[in-house]
Amino acid sequence: MRLLAPAAALLALPPGTALAHSSLEGIGAFPNGLLHPVLDPAHILCFVACGLLAAHQPASAMPRLFLAAILSLAAGLILATFDIPAWDARIGVGIWTGTLAMGALIAATAARPYPGVAALMGFTCLAVGLDTRLENAAIVERLVFAFGTWMGAALIVVNLALACRRAAQFPLAQVGIRILGSWVAAAAAMMLAFSLKTSGV
């Protein structure tokens, strides 16, 4: 509960290129990449949704969901590193749309297998990867940054999913996960509306 106020403050920050593609000076490309997933509101909300949704699915499906998320993210990061395609504001719309859908599925019901969950997670993580790049840097530095981002995101998704999976054996925790999913969906819906308005989609 003590994290709600900082999380709300982060979500209230205006999105933009400076927020999504900036780096912390003086700590190097890899630490910058490792920290990037928790410094960008759109990205951390997406990874939280991926972790919660993976935990919400049958245990046998979790490895497939992890692979869908982290491989799609890696593909997006590689494309973004080489500016293929050039960054577009509509990528943000894709991130918020996918995050909204994942949050809605988490809130809808517990431990129910949904078809297409791997594709949904893959699509959203691909969009996050395309939205992530280190500006004004050499290609090697960009690649190191991308690898750090991939590692940080994978740690968030996998560890959150496994922790929630263990907690979900308690009925009260299941309710809490569904409530958190509804908050994710609500935040994503607000930011999606803002992104649609500002991007002209």
Image (tube, rainbow, N blue to C red):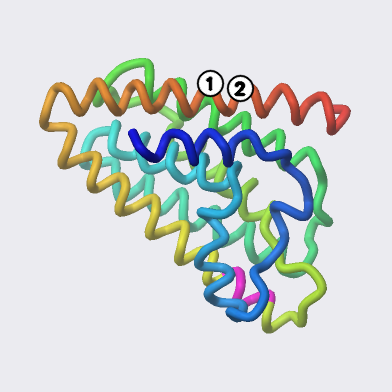
Q: Which residues are magenta?
A: 142-146
| Disc 1 packing (10 Å; few <14; some 14–19; many ≥20) | some
19 lies left or right of 28? right
| Residue 115 lies in the magenta stretch | no
| Residue 145 lies in the magenta stretch | yes
Secondary element type, mark 2: helix
Furthest toward the right, the residue is: 200
Q: Quadrant of residue 91?
A: top right
Tally of numbered discs: 2
Which residue is pictured at 33% across the width and 53% down the height?
A: 158
Amino acid tagged 2: Ala
Quarter of the image containing the N terminus?
top left
Residue 140 at x, y percent in the picture: 68, 83
Which residue is pictured at 66% across the width and 28% down the height?
A: 191
Secondary element type, mark 1: helix
Residue 169 at x, y percent in the picture: 11, 32
| Disc 2 packing (10 Å; few <14; some 14–19; many ≥20) | some
Residue 29 at x, y percent in the picture: 61, 77
Query: Which SS does the magenta portion mostly show?
Result: helix
Instruction: Give the answer, above or below, for where 34 lies relative to 14.
Output: below
Which residue is pictured at 75% across the width and 30% down the height?
A: 195
Q: Which residue is mark 2?
A: 189
Instruction: Give the answer, above or below, for where 151 lies relative to 6.
Output: below
| Labels 1 and 2 touching (C-beta < 8 A) | yes
Quarter of the image containing the C terminus?
top right
Of residues 25 and 76, the one nearer the viewer is: 25
Instruction: Give the answer, above or below, for where 100 lies relative to 20.
Output: above
Instruction: Give the answer, above or below, for where 20 lies relative to 7.
Output: below
Q: Which residue is mark 1?
A: 186
Which residue is pictured at 25% across the width and 20% down the height?
A: 175
